[in-house]
Image: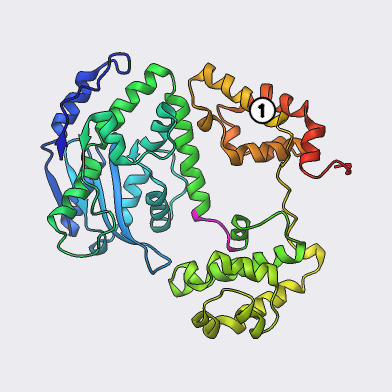
């Protein structure tokens, strides 16, 4: 680790730069404890139960399995750094302690929480703060990496060369261990400097709400029913029969991947799933020559897959999944420009970057609610929180004023929907 001499602690950004400097300096000499047995885990848990906040990260392997292999959990309490040797330990009590922790600080926690939910079987967490989300509010950059965040916010450079190394190897190399430690060593300091900036901008509550929303979304993704996984690949142009096949094949692929503990893409890549849906093969010959399914998978599961396809094709219209709503598409940019102007105006009012205020997916769902006269409960969760008043008072009336053009752009101009 090398530290720059440049001072980043602009008084216009933070009120208490000395507190950040003190935390940063203290982090340089934190004791590091390997947790490898029951006694050291108990000592770690005793320490964690007295903490108001901790910084966390995980290292895992998920190259050829459905279930990730958790290799290491790194924790910074502010006084100690723990490296928890996950493969050696029963972490049942550990997950409970983390679930009850007042505040868990992560950076880019998507995969980490996915593993957390998978292994802990806990409910959706409400104690998560993701510094990447905080940075998006302050910079407009949606996916700033940890290395860049430390460099720009704390003037600290850390190596990132070990990210793809074998984390199940023991002992870890010196470089691996230092990489793992650095992933949490400075995370509390990063949180502190971001919190001060968010406080000055009046954005703490908004960021906190979005962090909890993200944690809930990750929980729902980790607990999605097999027969709902097809929605990630569904297309509004698919017929009811094609959607039925897509739903059946997607659920079959998910269940088989879990049962055999291999990645879904090892069984059928997404393109192969699309081939099946568009070609609707009924014989092994068609499955072989009209899809990109790998030959080894054809030999193992071809007949089984054909049965799944044929059963789905036989469903009645009433039994098929509902049609996917068509997205808004039009060469007329009147609505898009009006919405963009409203978003930019609200950006000026709130200080929240436009791309954080409104995600593309949220806007598509908002268009659907207006165009199809759907209940407001169908609004995405992200538009029901602190953004709700703006959506209800500004965006919906604005879109309603262009409803005829909106419906035309969604192919509804000749319908009474």
Image quadrant assignment for residue 279: bottom right
Q: For the residue carrying disc 1, how many other residues have a C-alpha within 10 Å: few (<14), some (14-19), or many (20+)?
A: few
Above-or-below relation of 248 to 105 = below
x and y, in percent, of residue 325 in the image: 73, 49
> In this view, which residue lies farthest toward the front?
331
Q: Is residue 324 left or right of residue 143?
A: right
Q: Magenta residues?
A: 222-226
x and y, in percent, of residue 196 in the image: 32, 21
Q: Residue at x 66, y 40 (%)?
A: 365
SS class of the residue under badge 1? helix
By secondary structure, the bulk of the magenta-drawn segment is best described as loop
Above-or-below relation of 209 to 86 = above
Q: Which residue is mark 1?
A: 337
Image quadrant assignment for residue 81: top left
Above-or-below relation of 301 to 364 = below
Q: Residue at x 85, y 42 (%)?
A: 417
Q: Residue at x 60, y 42 (%)?
A: 361
Above-or-below relation of 64 to 27 = below
């Amino acid at each position: 680790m090398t530290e720059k001499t440049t001072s980043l602690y602009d008084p216009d950004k933070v009120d208490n730069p000395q507190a950040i400097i003190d935390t940063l300096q203290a982090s340089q000499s934190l004791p590091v404890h390997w947790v490898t047995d029951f006694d050291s885990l108990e000592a770690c848990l005793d320490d964690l139960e007295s903490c108001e906040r901790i910084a966390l990260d995980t290292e895992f392997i998920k190259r050829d399995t459905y279930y990730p292999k958790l290799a290491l959990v790194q924790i910074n309490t502010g006084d100690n750094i723990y490296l928890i040797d996950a493969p050696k330990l029963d972490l049942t009590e550990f997950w409970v302690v983390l679930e009850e922790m007042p505040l868990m600080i992560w950076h880019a926690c998507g995969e980490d929480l996915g593993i957390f939910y998978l292994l802990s079987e806990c409910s959706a967490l409400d104690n998560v703060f993701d510094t990447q989300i905080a940075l998006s509010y302050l910079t407009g950059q949606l996916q700033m990496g940890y290395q860049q965040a430390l460099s720009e916010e704390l003037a600290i450079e850390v190596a990132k060369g070990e990210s793809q190394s074998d984390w199940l190897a023991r002992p870890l190399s010196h470089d691996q261990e230092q990489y793992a430690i650095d992933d949490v060593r400075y995370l509390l300091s990063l949180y502190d400097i971001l919190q001060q900036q968010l406080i000055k901008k009046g954005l703490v509550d908004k960021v906190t709400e979005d962090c909890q929303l993200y944690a809930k979304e990750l929980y729902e993704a980790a607990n999605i029913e097999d027969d709902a996984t097809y929605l990630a690949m569904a297309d509004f142009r698919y017929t009811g029969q094609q959607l039925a096949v897509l739903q059946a094949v997607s659920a079959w692929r998910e269940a088989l991947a879990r049962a055999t503990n291999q990645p879904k893409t090892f069984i059928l890549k997404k393109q192969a799933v699309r081939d099946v849906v568009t070609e609707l093969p009924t014989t092994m010959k068609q499955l072989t020559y009209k899809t990109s399914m790998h030959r080894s998978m054809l030999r193992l599961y071809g007949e089984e897959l054909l049965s799944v396809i044929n059963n789905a094709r036989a469903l009645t219209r009433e039994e098929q999944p509902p049609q996917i709503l068509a997205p808004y598409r039009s060469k007329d940019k009147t609505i898009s420009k009006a919405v963009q102007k409203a978003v930019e105006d609200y950006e000026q009012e709130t200080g929240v970057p436009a791309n954080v205020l409104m995600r593309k997916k949220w806007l598509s769902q908002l268009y659907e609610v207006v165009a199809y006269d759907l209940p407001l409960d169908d609004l995405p969760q992200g538009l029901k929180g602190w953004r709700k008043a703006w959506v209800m008072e500004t965006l919906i009336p604005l879109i309603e004023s262009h409803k005829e053009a909106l419906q035309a752009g969604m192919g509804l101009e000749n319908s009474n929907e």
